Amino acid sequence: MDLSTKQFVLNIIEQAKDLTLATVRPDGYPQATTVSYAHDGLTLYVGVGRASQKAENVRRCNKVSLTINIPYANWNQIQGLSMAGIAAIISDPEKISHAGACMMQRFAQLAQFATTQGMDDIVFLEIKPQLISVLDYQQGFGHTELVTV
């Protein structure tokens, strides 16, 4: 991926607050869910319930897809990302701490949630993109560029 494309991707990741994460259910159907996320470069972090269907899906199949879009006034302004990636439930304490710090930096309200709800029922997913479809309709309606990470 060239530097300008990487910067475009990072700008989209930074501007948006939520992504739609698709995991594979036991019956083979995709399950798409909107979740908030944080990031460190291209690595994405998502907090999910320890016993949630998303976590169970990732335990069984680590391949995920996701989309990130920023708001637009008309179709000619659409900019976003569609990614195929590998997800893992973080178990290393240092990585858990890093993911939590990234989430806290992005979502200050998490501090209140963490003290009132507790974090024992939450796990962090680390998502590493493998393939990114970059959407930039400002370069022409339907313009996409497929890049490998």
Image: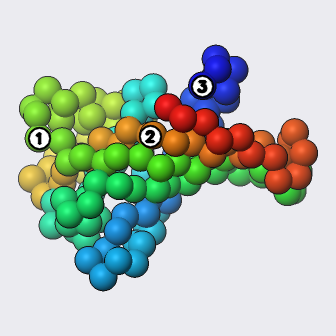
Task: Say if mark 1 contacts mark 2, CB within 8 Å.
Answer: no
Taking the view exactly as shown, the residue that stands out farthest to the top is 3
Residue labelled with disc 3: 1
Quadrant in which the N terminus appears: top right
Residue at 42%, 72% in the rendered image:
30
Question: What amino acid type is highlighted by mark number 1?
Answer: Ser
Q: Earlier in the sequence, mark 1 or mark 2?
A: 1
Question: What amino acid type is highlighted by mark number 3?
Answer: Met
Q: Position of residue 72 (x, y in %)?
A: 78, 51
Question: What amino acid type is highlighted by mark number 2?
Answer: Pro
Taking the view exactly as shown, the residue that stands out farthest to the bottom is 27
Q: Which mark is residue 129?
A: 2
Q: Which mark is residue 91?
A: 1
Determine the CA span between mark 3 and mark 2: 12 Å
Q: Earlier in the sequence, mark 3 or mark 1?
A: 3
Q: Earlier in the sequence, mark 3 or mark 2?
A: 3
Q: Secondary structure at mark 1?
A: loop
In front: mark 1 or mark 2? 2
Front one among 93 and 29: 29
Q: Secondary structure at mark 2?
A: strand
Task: Say if mark 3 contacts mark 1, CB within 8 Å.
Answer: no
Q: Secondary structure at mark 3?
A: loop
